[in-house]
Image (spheres, grey):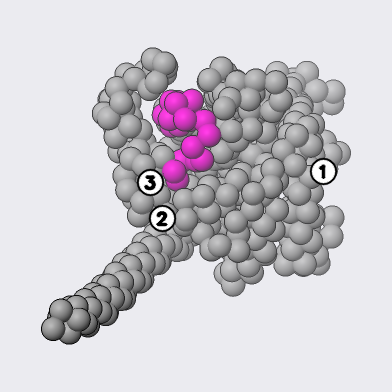
Amino acid sequence: MQKTQKGLSAVQLTMMALGSVIGGSFFLGSSVAINAAGPSILISYIVAGALIFIILYALSEMTVAAPNVGSFSTFAARELGAGTGFVVGWLYWTGTILSMSSEAAAISILVREWYPNVSIGLLGGAIIIGVTLVNLLGADKIGKLTSGLSSIKLLAIVFFIVTALMLIFGLFPGTPAVGAGELVREPLMPGGLGGLAGSMLLVVFAYAGFEIIGLAASETRDPAKTIPKAIRYTVIALVGLYVVYAAVLLPLIPTSALNENVSPMVASLERWGIGWAGRALNIVLITAILSAMLAAIFGLGRMIRSLTDEGHAPKFLIDKKDVPYRGILFSGVAMLLGLGFGLLFPRVYLVLITTGGFALLFTYGVIMASHIKFRKRNGCPPNGICQMPGFPYTSWIALVAIVVILLCMPFIPGQEAGLISGLIMVIFFSSVYVLIRSRKKAQTRGEEKTGTKSRNYQGELLTEASAELTRKIDNEET
């Protein structure tokens, strides 16, 4: 039954999506992507935006057709088989766990600008515990809270864009016009096509989180209208912001000066003597990342619910309440373990973000494969709501592009660990599913065998009883 009176509105859903998307992967992780691609990062953002547009509309078609069915893991199970649904559900959950652990690490890295000796493990752990407990308040309160925090981060990006434009055109007091600045001195692709291709993982990952629109579908009012509208708002806002952000950033700072330990916004403003603005932005970036974590944990709890409904998660995680408390708390504990995993490596943040990026991109590939099968089976979804332009070509282009991006991960130093970890996760969850399936089959065979033995024993008793009755009748006749 569709929710028409209560539930998340298109604006709330959009702000929640923006809250989940615009986090550490944008404010901190973009440094690695910009360093690798140079000015051609603009191409990466535009191409990635087009890719996200296609994925979102594929997800939207399936979600609007069945808003209460669960999530994209359910779609994958229905279209590609139960094993695929199991693997992609747990892989997405694990990838998001790792990416949110990277968000906690990102906050700790930003705080180190003021407190150099702060422990990433302790501060990151405290942040994870805090946002997990806040998520227990429920969808409506989380929706309002993330909407407020998302507004702050969007204003911060607008503030940076306006400040950068003032520097470029010489409108900032006491600072000469930057003009084209560093763009004049840098080649379009300093790392060649390999650098551009390698940057795509982190650029696409900077858009990651939009899938919360699908996860929250059952908690929206009138999903058939709300979800497509939220998708349009989200795509326009993200692509516009990212492209303009990169365009005004590039003249201000050499791309070679950026790495995963510095925010491009803060570094570029400090380079031109506007340290106070950089410090103010640092505070805003922390709130921005917190909102991303809040929105992501919201989605994680719903993903666990979907997995339990499909019988793909342990029974102790089953929770029939409106707020999936067990799924949220379980995800919070796993996030702490994810942070501990990242601390095993020297480049904590990069390992976490690339491993999470692999898992999410793999999920997006499965979404596209599910959508292709869905459309072949149904044609247009129920009620004739066909949204995907250029089907089937656009869906196939998106699927191939995702595979190519994953294969290009080794072009960027530090991403090899993410690729290896991601492949290990795929193999691990596939093996777990095979073991569970084998155990269930063995259990079923055992039950059938026991049932056969029981039926045979009952038959023998009936035969003996019949024979005894026949003997009695013969004796009486005699």
Q: Give residue 252's position: percent from left, percent from top.
A: 65, 33
Q: How many residues crowd around disc 3 within 10 Å: few (fewer than 14), some, or many (20 or more)?
A: some
Residues in magenta, as a range = 55-74
Q: Which residue is mark 2?
A: 87
Q: Nearer the viewer, residue 352 or 350?
A: 352
Taking 427 as reference, is 131 left or right? right
Q: Are marks 2 and 3 in contact (CB under 8 Å)?
A: no
Q: At x 69% / y 28%, what residue is drawn?
A: 7
Q: Give residue 148's position: percent from left, percent from top.
A: 79, 31
Q: Which residue is mark 3?
A: 77
Specify the principal SS of the magenta part. helix
Residue 56 among magenta residues: yes
Q: At x 27% / y 72%, what residue is drawn?
A: 455
Amino acid at circle 1? Ile
Q: Does the rendering let one see residue 44? A: yes
Q: At x 26% / y 28%, what residue is drawn?
A: 376
Give the numbered dot on residue 50. Answer: none
Q: Which residue is mark 1?
A: 283
